[in-house]
Amino acid sequence: MTTLLSVHGLKVAYGGIHAVRGIDFEVASGELVCLIGANGAGKSSTLKGLMGLVPHGGSIHFDGERVQHAATHTIVARGLALVPEGRGVFGRLTVAENLDMGAYIRRDKPGIKADLARAYEHFPRLAERRAQLAGTLSGGEQQMLAIARAMMGRPRLLLLDEPSMGLAPLMVQKIYETIATIAGEGVTILLVEQNANLALKVSHRAYVMESGAITLSGPSAELANDPQVRAAYLGE
Amino acid sequence: MDIFLQQLVNGLVLGSIYALVALGYTMVYGILELINFAHGEVTMIGAMVALSVIGVLMGAAPDLPGVMVVLAGILVAIPACMALAFGIEKVAYRPLRKAPRLAPLITAIGVSIILQNLAMLIWGRQYVSFPPLLPVARFEFLGAHISLLQIVIVVLAVTIMAGLWLLVEKSRLGRAMRATAQSKEVAELMGVNVDRVISATFIIGAAIAAIAGVMVSAYYGLAHYYMGFMLGLKAFSAAVLGGIGNIAGAMLGGLLLGVIEALGAGYIGDITGGFLGSHYQDVFAFFVLILVLVFRPSGLLGERVANRA
């Protein structure tokens, strides 16, 4: 497996607060890696740093090329996509327009059309509501839309920030089935979750983050059995 | 009855010009939540540049048909205003993108003052008259007089508004503009170059303002370095009336404001028994602005109330 993303000494600071204190991690092509940890551990800041949304230090290589200090839209053009925390759908655009925005960087009309059809096939709920404003969708539908929209850009690395947040258990299950399906299609995924149980089940490897640093890492199945992890994150 | 119809016609003509200028205010507000007070001055510079070009052309090529001369003036004024607005955004507003909202607002007022004084230095303090180049033709319609210029202004304004509507609703750039208006961060995450979209918004508004500036100076027969102030304030009132940030609202607000103003000016003498004359017409725009702010702060078509200072 080839390394798709490699991060060394990533630091993110807001004003005087160090949210991420120099972390190293890697994601290989085709992997589903998760980053778990408590609220405020620096997980979201890590993703924002990767996307160039916040000032950051350290080095980030994507597919062998350095990407840090680039503008966010150029990072997106290289094949990274982030589904932000809280979904970030455009509430006053229709579902269809939201999906079109996901394909903004692409120019291949037939390919976009085919992907749109596939997205609707994947998410029949979105097909039913394609002409509706995204703001009128339920939280779970918005999360589906946000993921489908990110996939419209055909990313090579999909970053998901707390996709289960604020959703009913049944909807969480659906979202995780979707994530597993996308991963099964060969898309590389970096998943950030507070819900360690879920994340460890679906992922190949995991990193545990605590106050801005990575404290543990390894195959997800092993971490799920690690007494320390079980005590701290799985409520046992 | 015929005075009513006449004033209605005059109001629609004036209103379509207000609507064009109001679009520039509302588009920028929609994306940056900034009231670009310099927009009235951009309109004024459009008129001034066009008049300068017209003056030069009349001297250099006296045989050229009048319509062509005016058209040439417009065609130079448009890129001039586009470049000006691009520069204003880049130099004055972009560095303040993350500053508290009051900072860019005050900067906008500063830019407006600078442009007025610059225009005064270049074109002087006196009124510049619009030469009689356009064919004068009048039609009668149910007792109201309509000039060819009035018809051209309304038709052109409606065409521009329809074009802008299509651009915003149907094009890739338009979709990016609407996405950026909702969330700059998420728009960036879609691969939108937000800086470029913001520049495009200023440039499009300025191109429309340039045309509106030429319209207004052709309609009144003159231009002046100070004309952008009142025109800008009225267009801003129109944008607020329609619901600032809302493009359809700016169009509706502009037309309504023009009609209210014209009818008000036509009847104010009768209503006050001759105490106030039609030169009080400017009062109406601001009277309407106050009423809107008191009773419907989000405007006629506005969906949300801006509650930040």
Image (spheres, coloured by chain):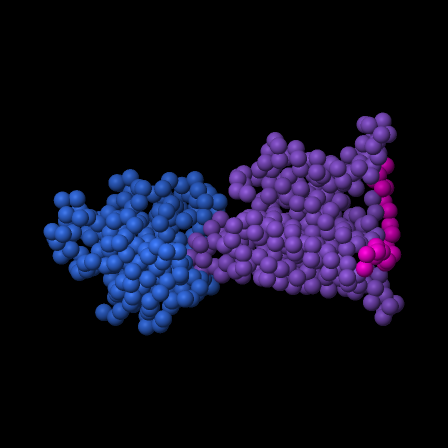
Chain colours: A blue, B purple
**Highlighted magenta segment, given as a residue range:** B124-145
Q: Nearer the viewer, residue B301 or A192?
A: A192
In which image quadrant can residue A9 be found?
Answer: bottom left
> Is residue B141 shown left or right of residue A97?
right
Tell me what residue is drawn at x 26 percent, y 69 percent.
Answer: A3
Q: Nearer the viewer, residue A86 or B232?
A: B232
Q: Nearer the viewer, residue A8 or A124?
A: A8
Magenta stretch: includes residue B139: yes
- The location of residue A180, given as percent across then percent down, is 25, 54
If the image is split into quadrants, where does the C terminus of chain A sit?
Answer: top left
> Is residue A85 shown left or right of residue B278?
left
Tell me what residue is drawn at x 83 percent, y 55 percent.
Answer: B127
Extreme-front residue of the structure: A16
Residue B73 against residue B165 in the figure, above or below = below
If the image is split into quadrants, where does the N terminus of chain A sit?
Answer: bottom left
Tell me what residue is drawn at x 61 percent, y 57 percent.
Answer: B202
Q: Nearer the viewer, residue B79 or B2?
A: B79
> Is residue A147 shown left or right of residue B188?
left
Q: Is residue A133 visible?
A: yes
- The location of residue A47, given as percent across then percent down, is 34, 57
Q: Main secondary structure of the magenta part?
A: loop
- The location of residue A158, given as percent across then percent down, is 33, 59
Magenta stretch: includes residue A140: no
Extreme-bottom residue of the structure: A64
Tell me what residue is drawn at x 26 percent, y 54 percent.
Answer: A211
